[in-house]
């Protein structure tokens, strides 16, 4: 199981939980598991989110491995220019 910190307003879609556990070995499994466990979060995931794994932000690296002891943070998609 991976501990996922839910950042900011995204927690309203996880029953106001700021931390959840999801069974996942990579980013795709993490996002699929979050959508299954928290259906209200699915539209946000489909729009796009960013995931920080051990301090590095990923957007679309679906097969990025996640270790059980990784620090994982789900946050609204970071935009810049």
Image (cartoon, rainbow, N blue to C red):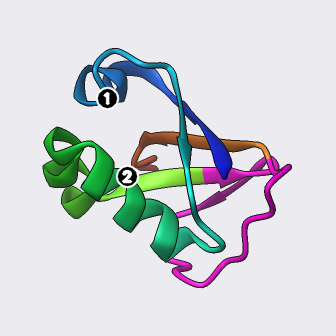
Label located before the other in sequence (1 or 2)? 1
Query: Which residue is rendered at x = 26% and y = 42% of the image?
Result: 38
Q: Is residue 67 above or below residue 15?
A: below
Q: Position of residue 25 (x, y in %)?
A: 66, 72
Check whether the beta carbons of the residues at disc 1 and disc 2 lie within 8 A of each other: yes
SS at mark 2?
helix
Residue toward you, 31 or 51: 31
What's the distance in space between the residues labelled 1 and 2, CA to CA?
Answer: 9 Å
Q: Residue furthest bottom?
A: 63
Residue furthest to the top: 16
How many numbered marks have been drawn onto this rendered protein structure? 2
Find the magenta span and give its range: 52-70
Q: Residue at x 42, y 20 (%)?
A: 8
Q: Is residue 34 shown above or below 16?
A: below
Asked if the stretch drawn in magenta spans residue 27, the answer is no
Residue 66 on the magenta span: yes
Residue 16: percent from left, percent from top: 33, 15
User: In the rendering, which numbered label is found on residue 34?
Assistant: 2
Q: Residue at x 60, y 84 (%)?
A: 63
Q: Position of residue 47 (x, y in %)?
A: 20, 58
One can see residue 81 in this view: no
Mark 1: which secondary structure? loop
The answer to whether residue 32 is seen in the rendering is: yes
| In the foreground, 78 or 34 | 34
Which residue is labeled 1 in the image? 14
Residue 61 placement, left or right of 36: right
At x 48%, y 53%, the residue is 50
Q: Position of residue 78 (x, y in %)?
A: 45, 47
Main secondary structure of the magenta stretch: loop
């Amino acid at each position: 199981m991976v501990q996922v910190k839910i950042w900011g307003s995204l927690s309203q879609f996880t029953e106001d939980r700021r931390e959840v556990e999801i069974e996942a070995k990579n980013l795709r499994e993490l996002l699929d598991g979050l959508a299954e466990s928290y259906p209200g979060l699915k539209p946000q995931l489909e729009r796009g989110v960013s995931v920080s794994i051990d301090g590095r932000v990923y957007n679309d690296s679906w097969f990025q491995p996640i270790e059980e002891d990784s620090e994982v943070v789900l946050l609204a998609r970071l935009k810049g220019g």
